[in-house]
Image (tube, coloured by chain):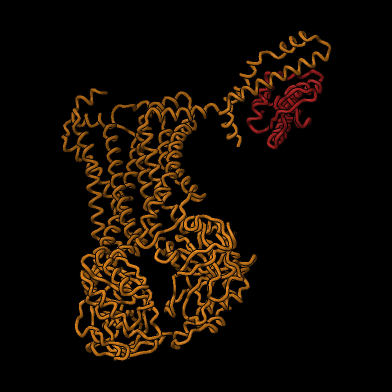
Chain colours: A red, B orange
């Protein structure tokens, strides 16, 4: 099992969200995950922004300031090529983890 | 890339924090907007958002903490740490940076000249396409007359190849010349460039003013106009706009100025700069054996150099058949018809400097490289010593869990910063150094015009030198000091015998390398200095001092063959003039003139000079028997010769040389004739000081063939006070020979001018040799002092157990002598190997000259002993009680 899988899960959620929405700001990412999971998963701001910052420094996402549809200025994030590669490998890794955890739970 | 972005983001920490704050603020605002949209009041919405969000400051802290996790902070800390180390020991840092700057600067300076002379291409479009046509394998038998080393084409040859050049999209010919520019009385010699009409078009040179020479300008020898260089335009024409009325005065005639070339274009000769370009002309009486132009062209796309050479090779038989000169013997013509043209790359232009100084510059680059190596070895020893001073600190840090990579990074970062500073300073220092070096090669007659500017090659070179030095002086000690087992370091501490023999053996190996390398440098220094001294002291067999040369074009206005003797006589009559003579050739100036002779059944070549009867007395050459020329040896009289001993040895066997008949083979303008030897002179040096005297023959100047009287002529004036004599001669000429334009120069200065290259080698090799010896003293002294300081306790014990001071000193000296011995053997072998490359530059001694080898070895032995005695005496002076108690 890979290291930091819990943190890895957050990264995966953010990367996947950005790949689905193309480009989004932090608040939008939180809202999207909330809506899609029917409020099952609520990403906290205190975890989201450090993760976004780390991804930006690592070159996985690219950020730029732009205005939202409601007239607010926000920092919009989008995946880079390296980010898409990361997403692919993390999705695969996640599938492994789920399979592994599932196997443990089903053990009778 | 990611690392670079991270380092960048560190430098703008404050603005990044502001950005995070703004982002969080907007987040909160959006949250409030949503809450209010769901029907909350403003206060309620804000309260809910703050509750859900938590403290913005805490979140910002968590965001910036990510950087530390990425290892950024530690890099910054390492840089800060390194800077702190430098500030704490500024002497050390300055010494390292200074040494590296000087070493890298010297290397870069030499490389920069090498780059300018040999590597850099001409400032033209696509220089890689430019090719030069030359006769493959040259013209070894020397048929015809070569105007300069670059001219390989006669006018008829050029006219042939101009019509047939399939591999080339454009073709042109050019030649350098001289023009007297300026109003009468204030003329100065300008560098001329004769070009064919396509020259500028094919090269792709553009005008900044007016237009350049075009094909329609070619034609008769009436020059329609000239193109001037940018510097000439700025300095001589005040940079005034070129109009149809712009003229300059050249050779006494006003000439229209058509335009100005772009500032970067200096002509085709690297090291010279053209002033005035004019259309080349083909005179009606063209000489088919005079090589007067250089031919170049642009390769068509799709043609390779090899294919082009094949094409011109196939063209050659017909071309040389068609252009053969008249008046040569059958053998000479056979050689002529065997000539083959070939194409050579010409993108870097042509250069005298390239031929003259190539091997000198390569040797200098090797010398400076070796000096840098010695300096690096010194620095490495210094770093090792420092590192062992920090052994305990490193051991503690490793024991506390610092990774080896982390420590290595820190040490390497320190060295890399020092090396980078050194390389940058060195690159800056290289500019004045290389300019000085080029200026030292200027002579009284010639100033080198070389653009010395750092381009990417130079900067790359400096960077590579910096990295190489960093690897040598830093990487090894760093690997060594972090590779230790912390336990041993902590245990051994300061006490007792220093156990790490391995470390000392590394330092020893470096000292031996230093001794070996400086042996090579010292041998080189002694060789070049002694060679230069030999050149200065060699006796050429002719008088050198206090001789003024007056050059003029002959025949000139009112000086012709019938009154040449009269001119010489009136110069001799001037008070203060000891003697004077006329000659067609200046000895030891590189000028060369030969004819093919037959004496009995022996034939071969001999140098020929045409002189007035007073020549031998003026130059202090004694006659070894026979009679001197007299004023009666004129054209109608029997033809006479005075030859040197080398001539006699080669052509006259057995009998007395006097009265022997010498047949001179015909050449264009020089008909066949038979002369009689009337006297013999000793061997004197001919064209340069290095070569052995060749067979030489002298002919009375009055017996110059009538067809060959268009010559450069010189009057040699021997006097006690050359400056007074020169002005007296000038006054006499103005009074009696108005219109005779005579250029004066000093004979001895002219000879010294030919030795500037040797002077440069002697100075620089000598300087670097001494520097190498000094570096060895410093290195040896430093390392020994350090060794012995480390062994203080051990020496104290030894002395307490009864070792005498003498034994302690002897043991240390023995150690040094062993290193010296190994270093000398290796150094001698290296010096012998390296000497082969220098042999062509040396005069009067061989690279394996035993005296030089012994001298260098003795010098180095002295240096080693001096550097070892002081520290070993100091070590033996310790009081055993003190040193044992100190622990």
Most distant residue in the front direction: B735
- How far across and how far down the image is residue B354, in percent? 44, 62
Against B868, residue A26 (above or below) is above
- How far across and how far down the image is residue B615, in percent? 26, 77
Residue B497: quadrant of the picture: top left
Residue B262: quadrant of the picture: bottom right
- How far across and how far down the image is residue B342, in percent? 54, 72
- How far across and how far down the image is residue B458, in percent? 48, 49
Against B122, residue B547 (above or below) is below
Q: Residue at x 34, y 69 (%)?
A: B589
- Near-viewer residue (B262 or B120): B262
- Near-viewer residue (B313 or A4): B313
B574 relative position to B454: left or right: left
Q: In which quarter of the image is the N terminus of chain B?
A: top right
- Near-viewer residue (B391 or A61): A61
Residue B8: quadrant of the picture: top right
Q: Residue at x 21, y 24 (%)?
A: B882
Against B686, residue B851 (above or below) is above
Against B526, residue B169 (above or below) is below
């Amino acid at each position: 099992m890979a290291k930091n899988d819990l943190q890895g899960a957050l990264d995966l959620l953010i990367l996947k969200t950005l790949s689905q929405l193309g480009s989004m700001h932090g608040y939008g990412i939180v809202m999207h995950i909330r809506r899609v999971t029917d409020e099952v998963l609520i990403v906290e701001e205190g975890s989201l922004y450090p993760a976004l910052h780390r991804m930006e420094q690592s070159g996985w996402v690219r950020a730029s300031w732009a205005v939202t549809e409601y007239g607010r200025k926000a920092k919009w994030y989008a995946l880079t090529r390296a980010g898409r590669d990361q997403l692919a490998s993390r999705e695969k890794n996640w599938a492994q983890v789920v399979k592994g955890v599932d196997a443990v739970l089903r053990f009778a | 890339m990611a690392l670079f972005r991270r380092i960048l983001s560190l430098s703008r920490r404050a603005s990044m924090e502001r950005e995070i704050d703004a982002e969080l603020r907007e987040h909160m605002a959006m949250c409030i907007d949503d809450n209010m949209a769901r029907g909350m009041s403003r206060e309620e919405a804000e309260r809910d958002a703050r509750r859900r969000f938590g403290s913005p400051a805490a979140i910002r802290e968590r965001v910036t903490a990510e950087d530390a996790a990425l290892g950024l902070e530690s890099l910054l800390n390492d840089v800060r740490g390194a800077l702190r180390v430098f500030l704490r020991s500024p002497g050390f840092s300055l010494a390292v940076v200074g040494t590296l700057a000087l070493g890298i600067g010297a290397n870069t300076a030499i490389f920069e000249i090498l780059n300018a002379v040999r590597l850099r291409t001409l400032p033209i479009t696509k220089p890689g396409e430019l090719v030069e046509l030359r006769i493959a394998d040259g013209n070894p038998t020397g048929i015809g007359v070569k105007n300069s080393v670059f001219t390989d084409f006669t006018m008829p040859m050029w006219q042939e190849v101009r019509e047939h050049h399939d591999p080339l999209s454009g073709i042109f010919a050019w030649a350098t010349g001289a023009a007297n520019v300026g109003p009468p009385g204030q003329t100065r010699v300008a560098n001329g460039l004769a070009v064919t009409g396509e020259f500028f078009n094919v090269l792709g040179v553009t005008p900044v003013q007016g237009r350049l020479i075009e094909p329609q300008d070619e034609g008769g020898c009436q020059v329609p106009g000239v193109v001037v260089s940018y510097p000439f335009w700025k300095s001589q024409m005040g940079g005034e706009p070129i109009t149809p009325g712009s003229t300059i005065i050249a050779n006494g005639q006003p000439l229209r100025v058509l335009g100005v070339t772009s500032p970067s274009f200096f002509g085709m000769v690297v090291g010279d700069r053209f002033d005035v370009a004019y259309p080349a002309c083909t005179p009606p009486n063209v000489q088919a054996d005079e090589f007067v132009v250089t031919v170049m062209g642009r390769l068509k796309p799709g043609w390779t150099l090899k294919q082009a050479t094949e094409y011109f090779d196939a063209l050659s038989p017909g071309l040389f058949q068609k252009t053969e000169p008249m008046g040569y013997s059958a053998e000479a013509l056979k050689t002529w018809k065997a000539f083959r043209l070939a194409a050579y790359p010409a993108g870097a232009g042509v250069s005298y400097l390239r031929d003259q100084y190539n091997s000198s510059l390569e040797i200098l680059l090797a010398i400076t490289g070796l000096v840098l190596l010695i300096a690096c070895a010194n620095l490495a020893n210094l770093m090792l010593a420092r590192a062992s001073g920090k052994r305990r600190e490193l051991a503690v840090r490793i024991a506390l869990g610092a990774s080896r990579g982390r420590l290595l990074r820190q040490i390497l970062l320190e060295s890399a910063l020092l090396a980078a500073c050194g390389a940058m300073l060195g690159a800056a220092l290289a500019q004045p150094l290389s300019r000085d070096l080029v200026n030292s090669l200027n002579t009284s007659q010639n100033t080198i015009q070389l653009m010395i500017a750092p381009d990417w090659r130079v900067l790359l070179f400096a960077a590579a030198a910096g990295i190489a030095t960093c690897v040598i002086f830093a990487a090894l000690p760093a690997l060594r000091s972090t590779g230790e087992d912390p336990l041993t370091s902590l245990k051994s501490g300061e006490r007792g015998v220093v156990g790490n023999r391995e470390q000392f053996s590394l330092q020893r190996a470096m000292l031996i390398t230093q001794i070996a390398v400086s042996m090579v440098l010292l041998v080189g220094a002694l060789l070049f200095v002694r060679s230069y001294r030999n050149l200065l002291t060699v006796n050429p067999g002719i008088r050198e001092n206090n001789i003024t040369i007056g050059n003029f074009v002959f025949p000139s206005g009112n000086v012709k063959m019938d009154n040449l003797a009269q001119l010489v006589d009136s110069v001799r009559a001037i008070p203060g003039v000891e003697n004077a003579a006329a000659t067609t050739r200046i000895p030891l100036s590189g000028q060369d003139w030969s004819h093919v002779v037959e004496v009995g059944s022996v034939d071969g070549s001999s140098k020929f000079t045409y002189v007035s009867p007073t020549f031998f007395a003026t130059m202090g050459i004694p006659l070894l028997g026979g009679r001197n020329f007299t004023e009666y040896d004129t054209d109608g009289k029997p033809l006479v010769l005075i030859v040197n001993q080398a001539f006699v040895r080669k052509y006259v066997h057995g009998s007395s040389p006097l009265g022997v008949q010498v047949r001179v083979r015909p050449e264009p303008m020089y008909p066949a004739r038979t002369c009689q030897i009337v006297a013999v002179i000793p061997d004197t040096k001919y064209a340069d000081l290095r070569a052995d005297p060749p067979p030489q023959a002298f002919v009375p100047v009055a017996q110059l063939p009538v067809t060959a009287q268009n010559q450069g002529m010189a009057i040699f004036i021997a006097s006690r006070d050359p400056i007074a004599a020169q002005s007296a001669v000038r006054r006499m000429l103005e009074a009696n020979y108005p219109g005779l334009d005579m250029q004066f120069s000093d004979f001895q200065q002219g000879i010294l001018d030919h030795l500037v290259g040797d002077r440069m080698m002697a100075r620089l090799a000598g300087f670097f040799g001494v520097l190498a010896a000094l570096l060895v003293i410093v290195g040896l002294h430093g390392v020994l002092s350090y060794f012995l300081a480390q062994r203080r306790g051990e020496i104290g014990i030894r002395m307490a157990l009864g070792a005498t001071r003498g034994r302690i000193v002897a043991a240390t000296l023995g150690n040094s002598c062993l290193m010296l011995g190994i270093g000398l053997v290796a150094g001698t072998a290296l010096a012998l190997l390296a000497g082969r490359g220098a042999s062509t530059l040396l005069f009067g001694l061989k690279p394996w000259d035993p005296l030089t080898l012994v001298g260098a070895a003795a010098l180095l032995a002295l240096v080693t002993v001096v550097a070892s005695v002081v520290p070993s005496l100091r070590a033996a002076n310790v009081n055993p009680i003190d040193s044992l108690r100190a622990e």
